[in-house]
Image (tube, helix red, strand yellow):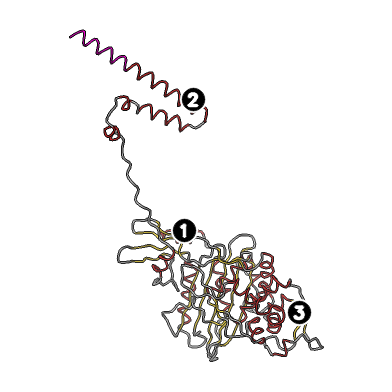
Amino acid sequence: MYTHKKENTWQVHQSAFILKRQKKRLLQKYVRLAIMLSIPSLLILGAWHFLDLEPLFKQEHPQTASASYPVKEQAPPKITLSKTDLKGLIQETVFLNADRDVFFVDTPDKSYTLTTSLDTRLQKTLAAAMTRLKTLNRGKPQRIAIVAMDPSNGSLKAMAGFDLDNLDANPCMVSDYPAASIFKIITASAAIDSLGYTAQTPLYFNGNKYTLYKRQLAETRNKYTSKISFSRAFAESINPIFGKIGKNYLGRTRLSTYAHAFGFNQEPDSELAFESGRFSVTESDYHLAELGCGFNRDTMISPIFGAMLVTTILNSGTSLVPRIVNQVTTSNGQIIYKGKKEDYKTAITPKTATTMIRLMEKTVTRGTAKKSFRGFTRDKVLSKLVIGGKTGSLYNRKRTVKYDWFIGFGKEKTGEKALAVAIVVGHKKYIGTRASSYARTILKTYFKKIPVRTAQLDKADKD
């Protein structure tokens, strides 16, 4: 009995000695690997295997051995919301004239929180203005639509307006407004891009600036001919010059190509189901001249699309897809959608875009928007901005509503902050506040510095 016990003790001792030697060799192997490869994690891995070798030498049953390892729990699948799903989710959400930037959407299954890009200070200013307009007896517009967009990422900062014929409609999203002289942006860009025009290119016209007779399309030069630079022709919105550019120099193919490049007759994949612009060319040469200068009721755009045209100019020729949702979260705080910047179309070269900025600046300083922006260089807020734009005006077919456009921009001279705006006002019998005047108010509100104390109170209210 004693002998048997001694024999067993020796066997145990011998096994322990062999096991210890094997552990020591394996540990030395992992240490050498860690030193050679300079990867500390190998040393940790070696120690982990070293500590877990004993069950292998005990020759446990595979099922028993595997049972000793903890089983990691599977992470719940990540839920995401596609842009298509988001479109359906927000189609009933009213962003127009909203005085907040957070919205709540309930479905039969879940509740969602939408955090938008809307600027609450600007939205509150515009919403109050829309309420006040509706109370007017004289100067009340039939329709008005205002869009403000951040040209650096395509996010909408404001959307306001109303349509007295349909108070439930969003007038910012439909393209049933005649583009009028706003289309001169496309004609001018095409002339610079493909014909080599510069701001100083001399041009000639006969007759009135704002008419478009067939005789004005001839290249006539006589004592009644007026000479003007391209930049002034754009700033003053001279119809005969842009009619001749469209008919005589660009032609159908080139004008159609640039209209398409800017996004006409297409629908970008945006979160918002808005209409873009409509453009078509007929066989009539005179109609081609009408298209070139915008003196027609066939070319149509929406205010959101108007803001997109501005982003094209400010982004070196590339437009951005408009968006309004920054993120969507579920009731438990899980983020399932995040908005992001999306390039849409490249229409012109960066050099052309730079020239267009100069032309649009001249509209404000010496052109058709000069009156609305008079004295802005002495204004405490506006003087710090580079401001440009384009105006346009045209009656509807029944001549009951006169549409008045301003699309343009303001950007800091010494910073990166910028804003693209598009405003259209449908005046009735009495002309009220013009679109360019609204643009001035919007830019001043958006770029005005908020006092530190006020900013802290606003943040506290949101928290």
Position of residue 199 in the picture relative to residue 102 (left or right): right
Q: Quadrant of residue 388?
A: bottom right
Q: CA distance from mark 2 to mark 3?
A: 82 Å
Q: Is residue 424 visible?
A: yes
Q: Is residue 129 visible?
A: no
Give the mark nearer the N terminus: 2 vs 1: 2
Q: Nearer the viewer, mark 1 or mark 3?
A: 3
Q: Amino acid at mark 2?
A: Arg
Q: Give the residue at the far top of this rendering.
A: 3
Residue 141 in the image: above or below residue 327? below
Residue nearest the viewer, comparing 373 with 39: 39
Give the number of the disc on residue 27.
none
Position of residue 167 in the picture relative to residue 355 (left or right): left
**Residue 227's spot in the image, x, y percent?**
78, 81
Quadrant placement of the N terminus:
top left
Which is the main secondary structure of the residues drawn in magenta? helix
Residue occupying the point 58% across, 62% down? 417
* Range drawn in magenta: 1-15
The residue that label 1 is drawn on is: 456
The residue that label 2 is drawn on is: 32
Which element carries disc 2, helix, strand or loop? Answer: helix
Q: Is residue 100 magenta?
A: no
Give the number of the disc on residue 203.
3
Give the mark nearer the N terminus: 2 vs 3: 2
Q: CA distance from mark 1 to mark 3?
A: 55 Å
Q: Amino acid at mark 3?
A: Leu
Which element carries disc 3, helix, strand or loop? Answer: strand
Residue nearest the viewer, comparing 411 with 321: 321
Residue occupying the point 34% across, 28% down? 52
Which element carries disc 1, helix, strand or loop? Answer: helix
Q: CA distance from mark 2 to mark 1?
A: 58 Å
